[in-house]
Image (tube, rainbow, N blue to C red):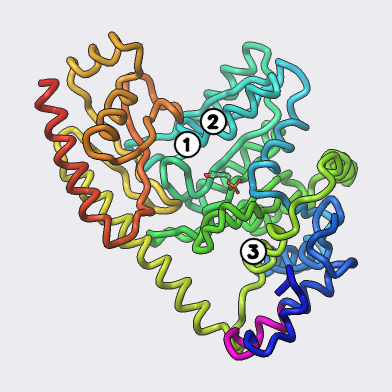
């Protein structure tokens, strides 16, 4: 309807689509000066949509003073990735600048740091306690890097985690905020999986926790969100945003504006997708019941699949998997036989890469080796997802189990 506005008055469609759909299309078009999705927009994205994002953040985080979350501090992006890249690009000035990232981490971070010529400063997540993030480890990593002359510019936190699937507790987040304050580092909060929660640990944004600590106006946070995850999963539409917390100086906002202007504007369909994410149908709207039903069905199914996959993995010899509390992944540890390790080395492969290649070839199941994300030395993992449809999950886990047992025998 927004792409071909003449369809808003199409009789046949009027009978098929829900009534509020037309009103929504009109509202979106009214927010576009040209009334056409084919034109450039403001480089930060359409103001009307940024206003909806600001309202979403204010409501989600129960921020009392709504003026603190300004549409000017919001930048719509083509997915979260370009926002992360712009953030890292503006932080890394020379090869002495370091960014702290979790190990294991999502490779967007390691790759962009490398591309910008900065230093990746890893901090290890603690697998034994459910991939928890420990402030002592942040301190260890910070001190080790700074003692070598590295200038730590920012700390990246992925919550819920990819590939590790953990969700942070509030107490843990408070300790992280204190660390950032003590060490004067910017917090990059990757919160793209905020809707994907499968345990009784709720998602809290860093902005909310900072606000509750009375530190909203002093903690510098750039947070990221995306239409790619959650229950929308519209990753091909490339929509997302980043938000600069109120503590971030206005001059930084202006610099970001210049930076994003280089690309003219984020794609308009992705911007509209963000609008749908942050401003979904409300109770009483014609579409609400269907929306709520689909959302709950998807999230409940993901939760069932998460539990099923993790327990199937844990039932195998030599495999241990921490609970998938959030996101869309399980990251099991695999104990590989010495002969498999030798075979991999003789082929110039990481041992976990040999394992996943054989899994693909023998069982047709595609997973990513832990070495692609970084892992504690001497440990091997792979990342798998519970995205296959529920009806396929049993078959996939059966195929995987058979492969794993055959693999252990082959290299016994
Ligand atoms: C932790 C994390 N951050 C960011 C992204 C980027 O997502 P997108 O650019 O599609 O929004 C992903 C994608 O998988 C991710 O897992």
Disc 3 vs disc 1: which is toward the camera?
A: 3
Asked if the residues shown at circle 3 and circle 1 are in contact, with their CB atoms under 8 angstroms apart, the answer is: no
Magenta segment main secondary structure: helix
For residue 262, side relative to residue 274 (left or right): right
- Disc 2/disc 1 C-alpha distance (Å): 7 Å
The residue at 80%/60% (across/down) is 38
Q: Are marks 2 and 1 in contact (CB under 8 Å)?
A: yes
Other residues around mark 2 within 10 Å, as few (<14) / some (14–19) / many (≥20):
many
Q: What kind of element bears circle 1?
A: loop
Q: Is residue 152 above or below residue 314?
A: above
Is disc 1 surrounded by few (<14), some (14 to 19) or many (20+) residues within 10 Å? some
Which residue shows up at 80% across the image and 56% down it? 45
The alpha-carbon separation of the residues under discs 3 and 2 comes to 26 Å
Quadrant of the frame with the N terminus: bottom right
Is residue 222 rendered to the left or right of residue 309? right
The location of residue 95, given as percent across then percent down, is: 71, 15
- Residue at screen point 72% across, 46% down: 219
* Residue 104 point in image, percent of width and height: 45, 32
Residue 47 numbered tag: none
The label number, if any, that marks residue 134 in the structure image: 1
In the depicted view, which residue is nearer to us: 359 or 135? 359
Numbered disc 3: secondary structure: loop
Q: Which residues are magenta?
A: 14-24
Q: Earlier in the sequence, mark 3 or mark 1?
A: 3
For label 3, the residue is: 61
Quarter, ligand 1: top right
Graded by Cα atoms within 10 Å as few (under 14), some (14 to 19) or many (20 or more), the crowding at tag 3 reads some
Location of the C terminus by quadrant is top left
Label 2 residue SS: helix
Please, is residue 295 above or below residue 362 in the view? below
Query: Mark 2 = which residue?
Result: 138
């Amino acid at each position: 309807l927004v792409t071909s506005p003449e369809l808003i008055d199409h009789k046949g469609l009027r009978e098929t689509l829900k009534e509020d759909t037309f009103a929504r299309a009109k509202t979106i078009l009214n927010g576009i000066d040209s009334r056409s999705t084919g034109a450039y927009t403001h480089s930060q994205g359409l103001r009307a949509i940024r206003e909806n994002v600001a309202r979403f953040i204010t409501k989600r985080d129960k921020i009392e003073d709504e003026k603190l979350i300004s549409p000017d501090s919001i930048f719509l992006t083509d997915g979260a990735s370009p926002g992360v890249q712009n953030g890292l690009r503006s932080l890394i000035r020379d090869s002495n600048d370091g960014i702290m990232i979790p190990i294991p981490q999502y490779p967007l971070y390691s790759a962009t740091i490398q591309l910008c010529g900065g230093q990746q400063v890893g901090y290890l997540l603690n697998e034994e306690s459910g991939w928890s993030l420990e402030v002592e480890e942040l301190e260890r990593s910070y001190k080790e890097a700074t003692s070598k002359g590295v200038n730590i510019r920012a700390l990246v936190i992925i919550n819920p985690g990819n590939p590790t699937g953990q969700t942070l507790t509030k107490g843990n987040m408070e300790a992280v905020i204190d660390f950032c304050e003590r060490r004067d580092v910017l917090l990059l909060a990757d919160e793209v999986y905020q809707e994907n929660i499968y345990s009784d640990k709720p998602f809290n944004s860093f902005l909310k926790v900072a606000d509750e600590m009375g530190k909203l106006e002093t903690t510098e946070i750039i947070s990221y969100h995306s239409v790619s995850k959650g229950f929308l999963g519209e990753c091909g539409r490339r929509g997302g945003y980043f938000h600069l917390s109120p503590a971030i100086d206005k001059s930084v906002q202006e610099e970001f504006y210049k930076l994003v202007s280089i690309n003219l504007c984020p794609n308009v369909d992705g911007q509209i997708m963000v609008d749908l994410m942050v401003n979904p149908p409300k109770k009483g709207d014609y579409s609400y019941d269907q929306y709520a039903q689909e959302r709950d069905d998807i999230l409940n199914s993901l939760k069932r699949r998460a539990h099923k996959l993790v327990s199937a993995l844990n039932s195998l010899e030599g495999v241990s998997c921490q609970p998938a509390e959030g996101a869309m992944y399980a990251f099991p540890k695999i104990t590989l036989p010495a002969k498999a390790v030798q075979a991999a080395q003789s082929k110039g492969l990481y041992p976990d890469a040999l394992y996943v290649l054989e899994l693909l070839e023998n069982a047709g199941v595609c997973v990513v080796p832990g070495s692609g994300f970084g892992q504690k030395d001497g440990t091997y993992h792979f990342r798998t997802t519970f995205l296959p449809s529920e009806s396929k999950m049993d078959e996939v886990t059966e195929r995987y189990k058979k492969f794993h047992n055959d693999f252990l025998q082959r290299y016994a």
